[in-house]
Image (spheres, helix red, strand yellow):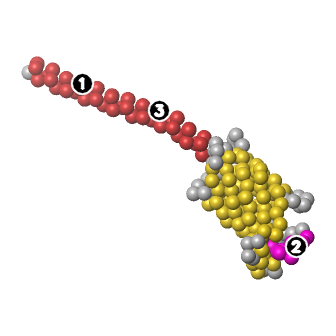
């Protein structure tokens, strides 16, 4: 009987050790996951994905044009804002309104991105031409603001012939989302 008791106690002791090892493994995995999660959160801020308030200082416009832009995680881009606008001579006849913008963006550096998007230009409600915008964007250290360089807006007729272009300055501020 003493032998049986020692064996049973030995088996229980081995079970306790195995359970403690499994518990320690779980704690180690949890501790490893916390820094990985923090790294994932900090790298999320190095992307443009999200919803942004955008202020555009376009050639000849007094106050900034306001718009909302969505940068999708898949590289898609959508923007909308003031629809009425006027073009400087000799292109003032091209249009009096613009539609929403659609395009693509790609990350080209740690906090650098390229964006190209297109907008239909309307005259009296009918599509009369296009606008193509290309720019390089730099994300702030915090990841909550961006500015552009080499941002060129081209105005094109219905046959995609470039009629005019201007250099724009753009600033964006990330909006809170769930």
User: Mark 3 or 2, which is nearer the eye?
Assistant: 2
**Residue at position x 15%, y 20% from top?**
6
Residue 3, position as x, y percentages in the image? 10, 20
Residue 123 in which image quadrant: bottom right
Mark 2 crowd level (few <14, some 14–19, many ≥20, 10 Å Cα): few
User: Mark 2 or 1, which is nearer the eye?
Assistant: 2
**Residue at position x 82%, y 75% from top?**
95
Magenta stretch encompasses residue 58: no
**Residue at position x 91%, y 70% from top?**
89
Alpha carbons under labels 1 and 3: distance apart: 27 Å
Q: Is residue 29 left or right of residue 66?
A: left
Residue 62 in which image quadrant: bottom right
In terms of sequence position, does the residue under pointer 3 or pointer 2 come before the other? 3
Mark carried by residue 92 = 2
Determine if residue 53 is in view.
Answer: no
118 to 110, vertically: above or below: below
Residue 12, position as x, y percentages in the image? 22, 27
Q: Secondary structure at mark 3?
A: helix
Q: Which residue is mark 1?
A: 13
Residue 5 in which image quadrant: top left
What secondary structure do most residues of the magenta stretch adopt? loop
Mark carried by residue 31 = 3
Q: In the picture, which quadrant includes the N terminus? A: top left
Magenta stretch encompasses residue 98: yes
Q: Is residue 104 left or right of residue 145?
A: left
């Amino acid at each position: 009987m003493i032998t049986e008791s020692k064996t049973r106690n030995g088996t229980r002791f081995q079970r306790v050790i195995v359970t403690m090892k499994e518990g320690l493994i779980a704690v180690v995995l949890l501790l490893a996951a916390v820094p990985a999660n923090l790294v994932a959160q900090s790298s999320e801020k190095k992307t443009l994905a999200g919803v942004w308030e955008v202020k555009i200082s376009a050639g000849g416009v007094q106050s900034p044009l306001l718009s909302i832009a969505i940068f999708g995680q898949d590289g898609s881009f959508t923007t909308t804002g003031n629809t009425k606008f006027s073009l400087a001579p000799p292109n003032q006849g091209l249009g009096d309104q613009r539609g929403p913008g659609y395009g693509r963006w790609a990350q080209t550096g740690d906090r650098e991105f390229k964006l190209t998007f297109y907008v239909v230009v309307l005259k009296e409600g009918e599509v009369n031409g296009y606008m193509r915008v290309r720019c390089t964007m730099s994300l702030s250290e915090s990841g909550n603001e961006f500015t552009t360089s080499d941002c060129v807006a081209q105005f094109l007729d219905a046959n995609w012939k470039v009629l005019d272009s201007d250099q724009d300055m753009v600033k964006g501020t990330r909006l809170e989302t769930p």
